[in-house]
């Protein structure tokens, strides 16, 4: 059995036993998102820094005692996590910043951070004996769920906005999902998938509905903590859509703090696109999230109704962090910069946090000496159209050396 002690409603505070409940708080309805609370006293007995160092399992499952897994035999075969945390020497030199790291989570089985929560979803579905899984997604949650489901023989039903990048839809089809491309926004696809769950009983992975997804997402930061040898950065830059990744990052640091391995927490910086920045406005303002009509090239964070808004705003404010918005132009420039300076290939949402870091530096919100970690959350092959906009044009030439010489002039 896992070390999960209880599930606590974010809104009313009622606590439930893990077996009592599947999704949200019955008292508060779909808004009543549940937080997972562990028995840290018990975990401490078996989980120590020394034991962690000895582990040969280099994947997200390295942190099994801190995950909501009752039956490890139900873990799928795909290798998720333990992605690189780069010291980005060329970027350090270029920006004159000596303490910046980039975590490239595009290096996961289906090429985004979403493989982490989806791996947990598949374990929970199998523990319950479910055969069919579903989710709504801007694309990456879907492709990761579809891949993980395929790897263990579960059937997946996926709802995406019809406008999702074609590479993400292609992934779904290759993984054998039944794909509903919804004529509408992600926000509409989300509501539809929950209706479908109620109608057909499919196991639902939706973020901020399924309580375990934050737990999967937190493994990205558990790795960062270990990769930085338990030194805590001043700021952690995170791209934000629904706000689940940033709450996952907060949860990782809280878990490790509760175990006594670190003595402070990082400030969390939420980065969104100018054309869709409800969390940024709420964090920098009175905390109230106003819904918007998304308009940005960064499809993975084009979320007008952030489902994990209450938890995310709370976590960012508590951390003493802030929000910052960047234009689509700055997002595309960041794709090119990460590529040319460091060989990291990011999709638009994947480069957004870096764009936000550059802007925060320009605006004096952070300084060059600060210790900073930036998350890259998805790979550039996910959205080749945007990559082309960022990268520019090839030189088209006749097949002879003269033609090459001419272009060199
Ligand atoms: C989902 C996603 C995000 C945003 O995560 P939230 O939990 O929705 O805030 C950022 N980048 C990429 C590549 C994603 O797929
Ligand atoms: Zn409640």
Image (cartoon, rainbow, N blue to C red):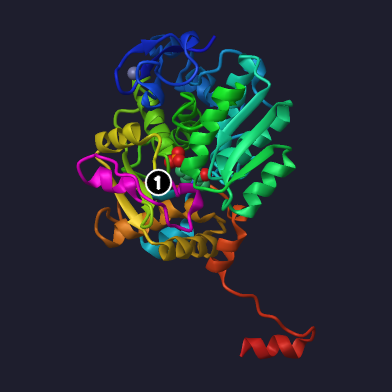
Rendered location of residue 118, percent (x, y): 58, 31
Residue drawn at x 69%, y 89% is 405
In-front residue for pair 148/238: 148
Nearest to the observer: residue 392 or residue 277? 277
Residue farthest toward the left in the current orientation of the protein: 286
Vertical position of residue 354 compared to residue 391: above or below: above
> In the structure shown, which secondary structural element does the residue marked by tag 1 occupy?
loop
Q: Residue at x 36, y 12 (%)?
A: 15
Q: Position of residue 37 (x, y in %)?
A: 39, 17
Quarter of the view holding residue 12: top left
CB of mark 1 near ligand 1 (< 8 Å): no
Main SS, magenta region, reads: loop
- On-image quarter of the C terminus: bottom right
User: Where does the magenta region start and end?
Assistant: 277-303
Find out whether residue 161 is within the magenta segment.
Answer: no
Q: Quadrant of the N terminus?
A: top right
Q: Position of residue 385 (x, y in %)?
A: 59, 62
Relative height, residue 328 to residue 35 (above, below): below
Q: Name the residue nearer the viewer: 17 or 232.
A: 17
Q: Looking at the picture, does residue 143 appear above or below residue 118?
A: below
Label 1, residues with CA under 10 Å away: few <14, some 14-19, many ≥20: many
Please state the quadrant of the image where ligand 2 appears. Answer: top left
Residue 236 position by quadrant? top left
Note whether residue 396 is visible: yes
In percent of the image, x 53 and y 66: which residue is there? 390
Most foreground residue, 4 or 261:
4
């Amino acid at each position: 059995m896992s070390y999960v002690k209880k599930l606590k409603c974010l809104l009313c505070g009622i606590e439930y036993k893990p077996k009592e409940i599947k999704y949200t708080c019955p008292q508060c309805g779909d808004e009543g998102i549940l937080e997972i609370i562990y028995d840290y006293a018990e975990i401490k007995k078996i989980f120590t820094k020394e034991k962690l160092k000895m582990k040969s399992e280099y994947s997200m499952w390295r942190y099994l005692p801190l995950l909501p897994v009752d039956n490890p035999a139900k873990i799928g075969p795909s290798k998720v996590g333990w992605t690189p945390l780069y010291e980005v020497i060329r970027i350090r030199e270029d920006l004159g910043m000596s303490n910046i790291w980039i975590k490239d989570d595009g290096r996961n089985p289906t090429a985004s951070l979403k493989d982490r929560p989806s791996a947990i979803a598949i374990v929970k579905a199998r523990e319950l004996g479910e055969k069919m899984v579903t989710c709504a997604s801007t694309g990456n949650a879907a492709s990761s769920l579809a891949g993980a489901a395929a790897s263990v023989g579960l059937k997946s039903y996926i709802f995406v906005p019809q406008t999702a990048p074609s590479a993400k839809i292609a992934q779904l089809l290759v993984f054998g999902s039944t794909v509903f491309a919804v004529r509408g926004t992600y926000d509409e696809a989300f509501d539809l998938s929950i209706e479908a769950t109620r109608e057909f009983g499919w196991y639902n992975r939706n973020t901020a509905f399924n309580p375990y997804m934050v737990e999967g997402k937190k493994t990205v930061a558990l790795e960062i903590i270990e990769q930085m040898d338990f030194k805590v950065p001043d700021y952690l830059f995170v791209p934000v859509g629904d706000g689940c990744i940033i709450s996952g990052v907060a949860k990782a640091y809280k878990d490790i703090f509760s175990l006594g391995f670190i003595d402070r927490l990082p400030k969390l910086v939420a980065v969104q696109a100018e054309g869709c920045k409800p969390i940024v406005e709420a964090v920098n303002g009175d905390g109230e999230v106003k819904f918007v009509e998304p308009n940005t090239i960064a499809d993975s964070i084009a979320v007008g109704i952030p489902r994990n808004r209450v938890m995310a705003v709370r976590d960012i404010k508590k951390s003493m962090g802030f929000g910052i918005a960047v234009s689509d132009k700055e997002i595309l420039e960041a794709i090119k910069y990460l590529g040319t300076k460091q060989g990291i290939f990011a999709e638009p949402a994947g480069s957004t946090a870096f764009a936000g870091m550059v802007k925060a530096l320009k605006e004096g919100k952070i300084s060059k000496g600060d210790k900073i970690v930036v998350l890259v959350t998805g790979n550039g092959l996910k959205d080749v159209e945007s990559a082309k906009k960022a990268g520019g044009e090839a030189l088209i030439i006749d097949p002879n050396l003269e033609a090459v010489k001419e272009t060199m002039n």
